[in-house]
Structure formats: C-alpha cells, structure tokens
Amino acid sequence: MQVGLGFWASKTLLSAVEIGVFTELAKHPEDLKTIQGRLGLHPRSAADFLDALVALGFLRRIGGVYYNTPETDFFLDKHKPSYIGGILEMANHRLYRFWGSLTEALRTGHQQNESKDGGASPFEALYADPARLREFLKAMTGISRGTAIAIGQKLNWKDYSTVCDIGCAQGDAVVQFTRLNPHLQGMGFDLPEVGPIFEDYVEANGLADRVKFVPGSFFTDDLPKADVITMGHILHDWNLEQKKMLVRKAYEALPEGGAFVVFEAIIDNDRGNNAFGMLMSLNMLIETPGGFDYTGADCEGWMREAGFRSTRTEHLVGPDSMVVGVK
C-alpha cells in the first residue's frame, strides 16, 4: 500500500518544494495562520498539508509553530548552495506526468516526454532558453555535489595534475575536484551555450585561475586531453553504441596511466539492491530514445574493450558509485 499509493507522499513533497514551504521556513519558524497567508494556502487544506509534511518527517511542529528539519533546511532552502530541489522541481513540472505513461513505454520502448509526438527533445528546449538552461544546470549541481566531493576525496589525485569533466553543466564537479586538490588544473567541456554559466560559477568559487571552459560536442569533437577524464550522469543518456563511442573517446584523450572516471547511479552487479539505479534506467526509457543505466561490470567491460588495462567500481554516496579505468 505504501508503494502503490506512494504518489500521495511524492506529490505532497513536490508541491511543498514548488510552493516554497522550506525556503519560507528557513527564514524563521511560523504558525499555521502566518504560513498559510504567506504561501497563499486555502484554509480548507493548509493544516492537512503542513501536518502531512510533519508526519512524513519533512517538518517539525512544536506548540503550533512549524519548523524545517535539519535536512530540509539544508537541502530544500532555495537560497542555500546545498539546495537539491531543482531536480524535484523538474520532477514536479515534467516527470510526474510523463511517468503516468510508463505502461505504454514498457510495451512500446518509446520515450514519453515532450518528444513523444514529434516535439523537440528536452535538451534542445533547454539549451534554446538561457533562463531554463541556467536553472537546469543549477539543479544538476545540487544533485551531484555529494558525489563530486566524494570523488575529490577518494581518487588518488596526487598522481595527476589535470582533470577535464565532460558534460560539465554548471561546473561544480570540476570545482569540487580542484578545491579539494589545490595542485590540480581543471577544465569543463560542454556545448558553447554553457560557457557563460560555467565561467560565472567558477569565478564565484574563486577558481578562475585554475579552471577553464572548453566548448564543444562530444559527438563531433575530440575530447580535451587531460590526466583524468570524468563523466557524471552522461553515459546513461545514450544507447549502447553511443556509450562505447564515448568510452573510446575518453581513452584516446588520456595519456598512458591516465584515468577515466564514470559516476552515476551504477546498478549493482546482482541487479537486486540499487533500486534507485534501476528506476533511473526506467526514467531513461521515459526520457530518451535509447538510454539506459547499467552495472559496474557492464561499464568495466566497455572500458576493457576500449583498451583500459585496469578497471574497478567503487561506491561513493547514496545510490552513486564510480567506475574507474586506467589506461
């Protein structure tokens, strides 16, 4: 029953993020009447909505006053750099309705998003609108930051002097790698439209002297040469042939002894534990023509096929792991 009716709790949280409940309460705790008025909630439903968030563990209520929990205050206040709600905003505005067509996707193998009836792909629409692109790239920063920090701490960076993040988005991954390893010089590689957003973010983090943007497309251009090439939440967007092509391009861009690091919600080899990774793969069914998530063994196989001499899979945080190939 909890899983079958899970959309009740899901939509309650997504609406709370959309309305700005956690951002409002991050300013200061409020009673029912105050928060109802400030957020424009109807009196019929305001108490049920807020108390449901209490019961679900997203808010606390003490003496009739509502407070964020430490977790929601940290992760769901839009004014904090730790905000991960951008991905939840996208889930609310887009994915929630598209997942209503999962059965059709399972039977046809066809994506169910804006492209379903011949519309532009989500990526094309995003990159054509600077404001939406900036919002999307910020969302990617929020969901990947913990993973990027873990890689910055766990990889043996002392053996390397340069790193390039492919499909770099706002640039947080390479910012975290270089922030945690002051000897590194970093690059971000993405479509030209991303450049100004990337450069603003790098400058805001005080790393403009060590991190630069390289424009290009990983389908038509060679990848920049670096000691370490990283790809986060990239490979799962594409079909098997495209995945192998990107792995080969990474191999070609690396020196002997260089490392290729792939990170995302890698599925466990037994395909029985990382539910998030398998559900993400179903999300690729909804969102892309041929994308899918994969196991660590799958990715290591593609790396060895490309010529990498050693490979390993290592858990990072939450559902995310990295697969490392050494040339």
Image (spheres, rainbow, N blue to C red):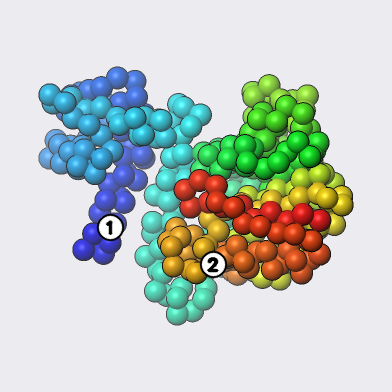
Tell which residue pokes out farthest to the bottom in this image: 107
Tell which residue pokes out farthest to the right in this image: 256
Q: Quadrant of residue 96?
A: bottom left
Q: Residues within 10 Å of mark 2 (few under 14, many from 20)?
A: few
| Of the pair 263 and 127, the residue shown nearer to us | 263
Q: Amino acid at mark 1?
A: Gly
User: In the drawing, does residue 106 fall left or right of residue 8?
Assistant: right
Q: Which residue is mark 2?
A: 269
User: In the drawing, does residue 2 fall left or right of residue 253?
Assistant: left
Please tell me how many numbered marks the rendered image carries: 2
Q: Amino acid at mark 2?
A: Asn
The location of residue 241, given as percent across then percent down, is 71, 71
Query: What is the spatial separation of the Cα atoms under label 2 and label 1, in whole angstroms?
Result: 27 Å
Q: Quadrant of residue 18?
A: top left
The location of residue 262, given as percent across then percent down, is 66, 53
Q: On screen, 83 above or below 327?
A: above
User: In the drawing, does residue 135 fall left or right of residue 309?
Assistant: left
For mark 1, give the secondary structure.
Answer: helix
Q: On screen, 198 above or below 215?
A: above
Circles 2 and 1: CB distance less than 8 Å?
no
Nearer to us of marks 2 and 1 is: 2
For mark 2, give the secondary structure.
Answer: loop
Residue beneath the point at 76% across and 69% down: 305
The location of residue 239, given as percent across then percent down, is 64, 69
Q: Which residue is mark 1?
A: 6
